[in-house]
Amino acid sequence: MASDEGGGDAVEEGMATTDRRAAGPASATTDQDATPHHDVRLAAVAVAFAVLQLCYAVAHMDLGWDESVYLSQVDPRNPAAFFSAPRSRGISFLVAPIVSLTPSVPVLRVALVLLSSLALFAAFRVWEPLLGRGRVALAALLFTGLWITVLSGPEVMPNLWLALAAVAAVGWFLRARRDAPGRRRALTGLAVTLAAAALLRAPDAVWLALPLPAACAGVRAWRTPATAAAVLGGLAAGGAQWAAEAYERFGGIGRRLALSSDTEGGMGAHLGAGLRASYRALNGPQLCRPCRIAGPSIAHSLWWLLLPVLIAAACALALRVRRQEPQEPQELREPRRSREPEGAAVTLLPVACALALAAPYLLLLDYAAPRFLLPVYALLALPVAGLAAHAVRAAGAAAGRRGRFAAVALLGAVLAAHLAVQLEELRVNTADARDTTVRYRRAANELGRLGVIAPCLVIGPRAQPIAYEAGCVSAQTAGNNRSHTTDDILRAAARIPTALLYDPSHPYLPPYARGWHSHPLPGTDWFAYVP
C-alpha cells in the first residue's frame, strides 16, 4: 500500500511543477524549493525497497553460481574460483569488508539490503533538482517495483549497482552546467559515479558514457574541458584495475575483449536474437542460455512491450516543449549559455544512455538474463515518470480538478496492477533461486560426507558454486571457465581429495574418471565420481 501511495503523490507533484520550458538553473531551483523540505517520498520508496528485500529476496539465503565466484575473490577462508575475462571486480571490492569480518551469508544479505537501499536513495536524489521530488520518487518506485530489482538487491552481483551508478552519473552530468551552482560538486559526482560504473562492469561503463561526448558537442553549457576531464578521468580511474588485469592475465585489452566475446558465445550481429531472448527471459529464468523457452503472457509482459511507446512519447513531448518556447527578439535574449535545452536533455540524455547500454545485450548477444537490462530500466524510469506527471497535468488543464483526480486514479490503478504482477514474479523467481542454491549446499554437504574436505578439488558441471560451499578449489578442463589441464587434475587427485560432478542431463564423463567410484548426491539430480 505504501508503494501505491508513493506513486500517487509523485504524480500529484507532476501537476504542481512546470514543464521546464526553459533551461536555466532558476527553473530547477524553483521546482526544488516549491516542495517542502521535509518531503520523504523518495526515502519511503527506499525503505519499501529494503522491506521487500527482507521479506522475499533474503529468504534466498544460499549463494548462486556467479555470487560464489565474486565472493571467492575476497574471501580469506576459501580458494578463489577462476575469474573469467568478462567479469569485473567492483562487486567483490564492495563486499570485501563484510566477508572479511564474517562468513555468514545471512549477515551478508542483510548488509547488502541496507547498502542497496541507501544507494538507491542517493542515486535518485541526484535528480531532484532536475525533475522535482515527486517525479523522482515515482521513477524510483517504478524501478524498484520490478521483481529483478528486488531480487538483485541482496545478491553479490554487479548489475543493480551499475544501474544506480548510471542513474547518478547521468544526473550529475546534467547538473554540471557551466556557471551552474554547485558545478564543482557535480563534476566530482560525475567522475566518482563513472569510476564506480567502470569498476563494476568496465565495458558497460564505456557504453554508458558514449552519449556524453555527443551531449557536450551539442550543448555549449557542457562543452568545457572540466566536463570532458570528469568523464574521461572517471572512466580511466575506474577502468585502471580492469586494464591492468587485462595485461597481467589475458595478454592485453584487445585479447581480453576477444576472450570475453568467446565466453559470451561470440558477440556479433545477432540482430533480433538478443531481443527475442530478452523478451522470453523477461520473467525468468535468471539465465536463459540457450533461450528456447516460450515467451511470457501478455498480462505479464505488457509493460515491457509498451515501454518503447512510452519512451517515444516522452521524447516527442520534450522536443515539442522545446520547440514551443517563445522566441524573443535577439536584443532581449539571454546569453546562449543560459538558454541550453536542459528541459529536453533531462528526458533525451537518460534515454540515449539507456539505448547505448541496451545495444550490446539486445543486438550483440543471442542469450539473455533479466539482470542485464537493469541499468536500462533504471534510466528509462525517469522519463516515464515525467510522462506520467505531464499526463496528470494535462488532464487537470483540460477538465479541471475532476479530470486531474481521474487521471491520478487511473494511473494509480495501472501502477497497482503492475506491482501486483511483479510481486507474483518475485515470489516465483525467489523460490526457483532458492531451490537451485539449496541443491548446491546439499551437494557440498554430501561431498564432505564422502571425505572431500579442504584442501580438496571439485571439477565438472557446477564445480564453482559447489566447491565454494565445500571450501574446495574448483577446476574445469573445458568450456568458459577452463582453468586446468587433465594432467593438472590427475596430479591433484593423487595428493588431495577430489570429486568430479556428473549431470545425467549432460552425459559426458571424462576418460580419466571412468574408473572412479560413482556416488549419488541426495537431494540433487547429480552424481559425484571419487577416485
Image (cartoon, grey):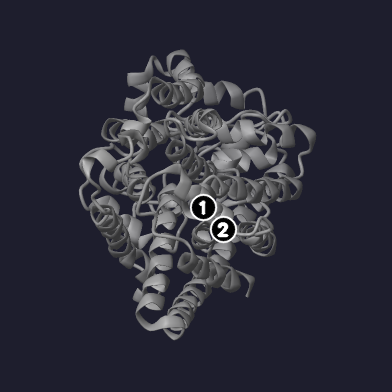
Crowding at mark 2 (Cα within 10 Å: few <14, some 14-19, many 20+): some
* Residue appearing at x 44%, y 62% in the figure: 385
Residues at marks 1 and 2 touching, judged by CB atoms closer than 8 Å: yes
Mark number displayed over residue 239: none
Q: For the residue marked with disc 1, what is the amino acid?
A: Thr
* Residue appearing at x 27%, y 30% in the figure: 217
Q: Is residue 530 visible?
A: no
Using residue 311 as the reference point, say whether residue 38 is left or right of it.
right
* Residue appearing at x 72%, y 39% in the figure: 451
Q: Is residue 152 above or below residue 279?
A: above
List the residue tagged with mark 1. Answer: 30
Residue 55: x and y in percent read: 69, 64
Q: For the residue marked with disc 2, what is the amino acid?
A: Ala
Residue furthest to the bottom: 402
List the residue tagged with mark 2. Answer: 34
Where disc 1 sits, the SS reads helix
* Residue appearing at x 56%, y 58% in the figure: 34
Q: Is residue 74 above or below residue 414?
A: above
In the rendered image, the quadrant that contains the C terminus is top right
Using residue 215 as the reference point, say whether residue 400 is left or right of it.
right
